[in-house]
Amino acid sequence: MSLFEKEDEQRRREVQPLAARMRPRTLDEFVGQEHFLGEGKILRRLIRADRLGSVIFYGPPGTGKTTLARILATETKSVFQQISAVTSGVKELREIIDGAARRLLASGQKTVLFIDEIHRFNRAQQDVLLPHVEEGGLVFVGATTENPFFSMTSALVSRSRVFEFLPLTPEHIKVIVRRALTDRERGLGNYEVIMEEEALEFLAQACEGDARRALSALEVAVLSSETFPLRLTRQLMEDSLQRKAIVYDRQGDAHYDTISALIKSIRGSDPDAATYWLAKMLEAGEDVRFIARRLMILASEDIGNADPTALPLAVAAAHACEMIGLPECRLNLAQVVIYLACAPKSNAVIKAIDEALEDIRSGRVLPVPVHLRDANYPGAKRLGHGQGYVYSQEEPDAIAEQDYLGVDKTYYVPSDRGFEKELKARLEVIRERLGRANKKISDLPDASTSSLPEGSSSPPRLRKARKTKENQS
């Protein structure tokens, strides 16, 4: 490197932000992602063997996707080419690919093509990469904050290894911040700075695993100060840490992950966690109608008759969202989320209907017992419809001792929680009066043998009725 080149490099470094200057240059300097980059892990082994192939880096901002792509090129002695799917098109992509092919033929040197925000490329643009990914001369590295299995073509994903980047831990962030404070060449080591442990702990937690955000806040705190030596306090770090934009795409991975966290927190009876996930969705701009619909489903699926008021309350909240809108309807949603989280839980309703559906789909289709068939039309009596039917309203407790299914089968099994505890006690009395016995599902007849002759005058296993009203429906 000539003297002028060194001076140019020094000027570029001076204007770069701290996060850019402190990018790790080797694998040993890289912090985090030990699950695939630690000693003996798959990606490190592939790099050392120079058998990398094409990869997709998926994860939140500030976790090292771009940095690691640069390191891959350095470690494999490849030429590094970077483009953004937001600003680049097929023409630029083809020029880089053609240049990589010529370079490989001329010198045998590979090219690492790093495409940031790769999910922004449409299907046609992604398909341009396919033949070159398979040839091996071009190492494709795509970076995305969205789940590639949702946002990218299956053809490109299937030809690439997918590595998920996790948010950095507070301990990772502390290592990075301490390194920046002591590095005299690229960091802030030339400044007299003393960072209080409380301030470091706050920064490590508040940046939420984003190293870029932590270094940016540190740089603001140091460079905005006029007097040195400088003591970095927690208050100073709070003032320097800017509000983070929420990573959330209403059509992408964060959308489904967050609603999943909300539903599972409510199901797990944790109103505090449920309130947080609701707040995150609201702050990120989620459609309140989507949230309300999921709450109505949950009210029946996970609470059901353990608290019959849960569903009306969820429906009322959905109606309030339509009538009021944001920001006020956040109160309605918060009320119902907290109520549902605290309500007794039961999945007896969904288990009952799903088991009945499974019986029907498996071919166990029962005919309507003759005594329950419609008897209100001419000729029904000649077919025997309605014969033996007992009008339950005139029976003690409005419970008639008769068969309503044709076989002995129990679908609804109430829990011992909430209102279902009362239902369970009442059902024991009802089922005793109905005279049912618990039989195995294998006792249900198949559809091929379950039909009755149209002229049959009595249903199968019809129990003796104490009082008969013929031809009533």
Image (spheres, rainbow, N blue to C red):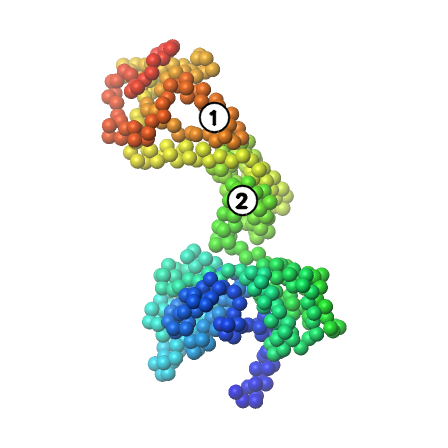
Q: Which residue is mark 1?
A: 424
Q: Position of residue 135 (x, y in %)?
A: 33, 71
Judge left or right: residue 143 versus residue 138: right
Q: Residue at x 43, y 78 (%)?
A: 77
Q: Which residue is mark 2?
A: 265
Q: CA distance from mark 2 to mark 1?
A: 27 Å
- For mark 1, does the 10 Å Cα neighbourhood hold few (<14), some (14 to 19), or many (20 or more) residues? some
Q: Quadrant of the C terminus?
A: top left
Q: Position of residue 179 (x, y in %)?
A: 60, 71
Whether residue 427 is situated above or below residue 135 in the rendered picture? above
Camera-side mark, 2 or 1 = 1
Considering the numbered disc 1 on the image, is that residue within a helix, a strand or a loop? helix
Whether residue 441 is situated above or below residue 238 in the rendered picture? above
Query: Could you say which is closer to the camera, residue 395 or residue 384?
Result: 395
- For mark 2, does the 10 Å Cα neighbourhood hold few (<14), some (14 to 19), or many (20 or more) residues? many
- Whether residue 386 is visible here, answered yes or no, is no
Q: Position of residue 452 (x, y in %)?
A: 26, 22
Q: Residue at x 41, y 65 (%)?
A: 42
Judge left or right: residue 135 versus residue 345: left
Say what amino acid the circle numbered 2 marks: Ser
